Image: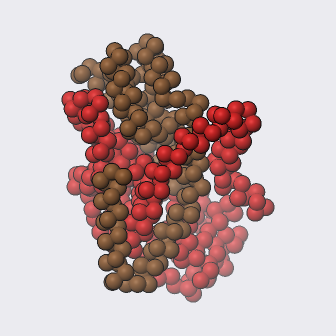
Chain colours: A red, B brown
Amino acid sequence: MKILKKAKDNTFLIVVVAAYILMFILKPDMGVTSIKNSAYYIKEMLMIMPVIFVLTALLDTWIAKEKITKYLGKESKVKGIILSFVLGSISAGPIYAAFPMCVMLHKKGASVRNLVIILSSWAVIKVPMLLNEAKFLGIKFMAIRWVLTVIAIVVFSWITSKIVKDEDIVQKEEKASGLTLNRESCMGCTLCTKNYPEIFGMQGKKAYIKSFDSEIDKERLNQTILACPVSAIRYNE
Amino acid sequence: MDIFTVAMWIGTIIFLLISLKKDKTKTVKALKMAFGMGKGMLGSILSIIFLIGLILTILPPEYIAEFVGNQSLVIATVGSAAFGTITLIPAFIAFPLVGTLVDAGVSVVPSVAFLTTLTMVGVVTFPLEKREFGLKFTATRNGLSFLFAIIIAMVMGVIV
């Protein structure tokens, strides 16, 4: 069972490995070229990801939720939009480098709209990239594309915020606090959200663990765990 | 390393030192958290990287350029936008490539579509993005980015 679950979590990895094995059997030289092509990206990742993870964790530790909510939350309006553009543009690395940072920001109250702006500008509006573009395609070309891209991001981030709600974004299990909820066995009775609404909420027809800053009331949590009819909630200290 | 990457390293190291001075236990906890995050994402990132390597071998960017150069405008635009979504190509390959395309007389529209989807929309990063943010967010963001990449390209075709 454990192996099966592991395989399910890593389907993508398995597919890629299988593709490589197939390629090495059929066309070994192309397999070698593929690995060589990957080398550049490995280097890029090693240069940026360690610093991203450390920075994300440090920001998570030191910046209060209220601050993020104030500057990047729903009420931040134009200021939040500008800040998001700046954050995305000055950061380095490929788009996936923005993922851990954005997950953390969302957990601390950044709005869906600002999330989209950070991710998109992280991907397209990079200062070194713009310089490169001006060099090969001309300053006029670069400037027009930059202006159009910014407008496009402003528009589609707004559309995204109308379609995607906060609850649609995956809430990660709080591993640090040792509290987990097995959503596969949850049958959506809503008992936990009634017993402990500060921690549990409903997402679709199933319960999830909200991000919470307050200390856990162990007595109350214990009662909630016992009340769950399918024992989907676990807590290890 | 470009200057922004260097700046990020320096900034983070300073931040880390201040954090250590202020509260050691908290900092150690944060570093553990960073390590956990890295471990959690490593498999997915490696899959993405090796998949890009594979795609670049089967579909070299030069082929894409050739294809785009020989098609009618509409097919070239949609085609190059679609190619752009599949892979992530570093800017130092993409820009010269598109530069030669434009110099060779290929219309601006497909070139711009290619450039924009190249970085903003990711089929290879889709599984990871989905795991981090959920299907609805990922599908909406990538879908809209693709649509707007084509709109940007068309507007640029009119202006330039």
Which residue occupies 36% across, 52% down? B1
Q: Nearer the viewer, residue B94 or B30?
A: B94
**In the image: residue B56, left or right of residue A12:** left
User: In the figure, is residue A230 to the left or right of A138?
Assistant: right
Outermost right residue: A1
In the image, residue A77 lies at what x, y percent?
A: 25, 54
Please tell me which residue lies in front, A134 or B125: A134
Q: The N terminus of chain A lies in which quarter of the figure? A: bottom right
Q: Quadrant of residue A56?
A: bottom left
- The furthest residue to the bottom: A219
- State whether residue B52 appears in this view: no
The residue shown at (76%, 57%) is: A4
Nearest the eye: B22 or A7? B22
**Residue that appears at 37% across and 81% down:** B20
Considering only vertical position in the picture, is B99 above or below A90? above
Q: Is residue A170 shown left or right of residue A223?
A: left
The spot of residue B63 in percent (x, y) is: 51, 23
Q: Is residue A230 above or below residue A93?
A: below
Q: How many marks?
A: 0
Q: Is residue A17 visible?
A: yes
Q: Position of residue B90 (x, y in %)?
A: 42, 40
Image quadrant holding the C terminus of chain A, namely bottom right
Residue B44 position (above or below residue A148): below
Relative depth, front residue between B98 and A161: B98
Determine the residue positioned at 47% across, 78% down: B29
User: How far across and down, in percent of the image, does residue A14 sit?
Assistant: 69, 48
